[in-house]
């Protein structure tokens, strides 16, 4: 497989995952009608695992070890955080808490994007 092709697929799936996250989040802040749509739900369930598979494929094709490339290790931790925060936010009923989780997850998404582009670790 070509690294560049997989990278573009990965980026497209990431964009889809983020878009679906915001659609669901804003819907849940309102009445939640769109978030309950089967196509939106199924697309989210499919997009996130595909995102992880494409990321693992990129690591193997590129010979990148997250324990040697600290930016990647941080990115993996942040992606897990993105998923956990998204799952937790689904169960919230308080609008202010939903907004807080949306803002927190937006910060996580921005940090993931920064790491993906700069390849410079924050902490490690």
Image (cartoon, grey):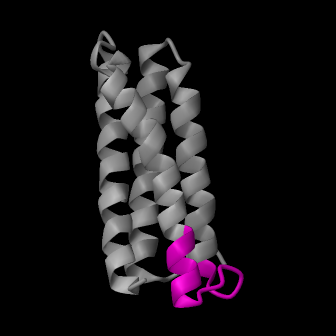
Side (left or right) of 54 relative to 77? left
- Magenta stretch, residue numbers: 56-71
Residue nearer the viewer, 9 or 84: 9
For the N terminus, give its image quadrant.
Answer: bottom left
Tell me what residue is drawn at x 35 percent, y 47 percent: 18
Residue 75 spot, x, y in % from top left: 55, 67
Q: Which residue is at 52% across, 50% downward?
A: 49
Up-down relation of residue 42 to residue 76 (above or below): above
Q: Residue at x 38, y 75 (%)?
A: 6
106 to 79, vertically: above or below: above
Verify whether residue 117 appears in magenta.
no
Against 114, is 86 above or below?
Answer: above
Q: Position of residue 5 (x, y in %)?
A: 32, 78
Q: Nearer the viewer, residue 54 or 109?
A: 54
Q: Quadrant of the C terminus?
A: bottom right
Report the residue at 30% width, 9% height from top: 31
User: Can residue 25 be spotted in the picture?
Assistant: no
Q: Is residue 99 left or right of residue 23?
A: right
Q: Is residue 45 visible?
A: yes
67 within the magenta span:
yes
- Most extreme residue toward the front is 1
Image location of residue 52, percent across then percent down: 53, 59
């Amino acid at each position: 497989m070509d690294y560049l092709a997989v990278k573009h697929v990965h980026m497209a799936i990431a964009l889809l995952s983020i878009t679906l996250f915001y659609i669901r989040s804003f819907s849940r802040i309102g009445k939640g009608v769109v978030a309950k749509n089967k196509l939106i739900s199924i697309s989210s369930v499919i997009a996130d695992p595909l995102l992880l598979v494409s990321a693992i494929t990129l690591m193997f094709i590129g010979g990148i070890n997250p324990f040697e490339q600290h930016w990647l290790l941080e990115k993996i931790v942040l992606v897990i955080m993105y998923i956990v925060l998204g799952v937790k936010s689904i169960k919230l009923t308080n609008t202010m808490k939903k907004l807080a989780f949306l803002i927190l997850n937006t910060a996580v998404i921005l940090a993931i994007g920064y790491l993906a582009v700069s390849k410079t670790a924050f902490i490690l």
